[in-house]
Image (cartoon, rainbow, N blue to C red):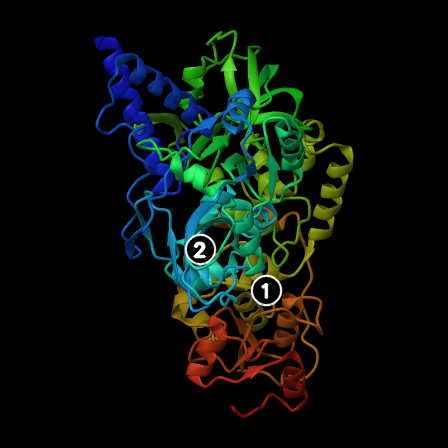
Amino acid sequence: MDNQMNRMKELVRRLNEAGKAYYQEDREIMSNREYDRLYDELLALEKDMKLVLADSPTAHVGYEAVDSLPKETHDSPMLSLDKTKERETLRSFVGNHRTLLSWKMDGLTIVLTYRNGELEKAVTRGNGIVGEVVTNNAKVFRNIPLHIPYQGDLVLRGEAVITYSEFEKINAAIEDVDAKYKNPRNLCSGSVRQLNNAVTAERNVRFYAFGLVSAPDVDFRNSREAQLRWLREQGFEIVEYRVVTAESLDDAMDYFAGQIARNDFPSDGLVALYDDISYGESLGRTAKFPRNAFAFKWADEMKETTLLDIEWSPSRTGLINPIAVFQPVELEGTTVSRASVHNVSIVRELELGIGDTIQVYKANMIIPQIEENLTRSNHLQIPKVCPACGHEAIIRKENEVESLYCTNPDCVAKKIKSFTLFTSRDAMNIEGLSEATLEKFIAKGFIHDFGDIFEISVHREEIVEMEGFGEKSYQKLIESLERAKDTTPARVLYSLGISNIGLANAKVICRHFDNDLDAIRKASAEEISAIDTIGPVIAGSLVSYFENKKNIRQLDHLMSHLRIRKETVSGEQILKGKIFVVTGSVHHFANRSELKAYVEALGGKVTGSVTGKTDYLINNDTTSGSSKNKKARELGIPILSEEEFLELAKAGGEKNAD
């Protein structure tokens, strides 16, 4: 009895911690599969002991919303759904009843209220009783109708989601590997709950209606399907569904199972809802679940394989992540050979050892995970040194979770962002060295400073055997490195990642010193700050960087590989002294970088933000309500299209504000 009670308390604590992290803090500390397993174990214990603890997650739904947005109580409580992974359990629920089977989307549930045809209010699910008001953010969802034909009071529910393609695009634009979002659901939750809806608008959030709560004067002929069709007529995108009975359930489920790998939106299962409204409502509800609906979660395809290695991958924060490398297996239609093990606690819990037989699956058919270690040799050694820098690595315990960290404040892995900048298009322009590839090279100990990148050929044999590489990719990388060796002083200066020095400032400084990097190294703060448009802050950053002997050694190492060509300034400097900001898409130039280069070739300077010192903002969408346009209007700064800018250049750099 005592053992069962202690186990219940432990399960309640762990599940509540995981639930709080997921619902309130938008982070995950355990997989969905692990949560479900522990939850089912707790249910069984409660049934056996006929006891439910006051704080049990089986007795409440979700967590209280954070205080950053106004709260509001839902008129109709939003309950969770009872769930199963067994098709026959779902078939038993469906029976002979006409049932709607639809996607269980994995985003953020939103309740919308319309009055007189206008969107009046949007509230998140929150804890099911109280949610957060996000009306301004909902108004910038990509597909939500702000005005609808129906003039009565309408309340409906749906899921806000961010597609996989949008998620990947947003993550690709984030240079800092530690700042990347973990999954579309977390990104969506953070996007919907922004205080500034300009951020929400940039994230391309979409809304899919899945249920009507109230439209009092409309006759839906007692049918949930009729409600969904009516919502579609009002302009809402609705969740995809199939009408089923027990007999036709298999065909519909087979369709959904085959479709999930092709979907661009995240989902974690299916929802079955009785079509007959009166019958469904007559069934009432339990303390936690309505009785007219049931959720189905996919039974993950499981494969046995052999653990070949554990790679310890350092990150910018110093955290060293364990990555399982195993014999490739086919899962959900794709070949997988790697899975994150997350932390030292999980490594120890699984009792891993090289050569062990492990079971792997794809969580929600997407993310590879280790389910179980069948042999549990438990002979894996946790590294005592960082694989990137060789300094001591220690285990830290936070919130009962053990993780491995590098203790070296100068660990090269912590500087991944600087390497990403160094290889970027405006810097050394090295193709084939993505952030992910750089991380792999750093983890292998191939790269310690910028010069090492140009010596990567000494690791050829290992690189061609790495996942995602091969001889062809290796040769492309070598060719790109050879091209990158021919560069300019401004690109080199910018690529060093010195604080406050962007490409435009680097070009101004290099022009002043006649493209002599050695002269720039030796220049005083007074001499640098005297340069037009270069102030004492930038000068201080530059001088401080070159006062560090380690930086000088690293620069010398880099320069030994480069062939420097000096940029020549041709044409009249008709834009000299003028400061520009460039934003939006361009038409007359290949990209914004090319337009910036043109401005600088004519003597102008390009900065990233609109300030009182800005002379012109270049934006083809001159009438948009973007933040830069608004700022320019507030300061009386002319907003030019490309055509107007080109006319300005021809006119000698003078144009009056409107």
Q: Amino acid at mark 2?
A: Tyr
Quadrant of the image containing the N terminus: top left
Q: Is residue 576 left or right of residue 591?
A: left
- Check whether the beta carbons of the residues at disc 1 and disc 2 lie within 8 A of each other: no
Front residue of 243/489: it is 243
For disc 2, the neighbor class at 10 Å (few under 14, some 14 to 19, many from 20) is some
Secondary structure at numbered mark 2: helix
Q: Position of residue 185 (x, y in %)?
A: 48, 43
Front residue of 271/432: it is 271
Is residue 384 among the parts visible in the rendering?
no
Q: Is residue 516 left or right of residue 400?
A: right
Q: Amino acid at mark 1?
A: Asp
CA distance separating discs 1 and 2:
17 Å
Q: Is residue 616 left or right of residue 458?
A: left
> Which residue occupies 37% across, 17% down?
41
Tell me, for residue 545, which label it has, or none: 2
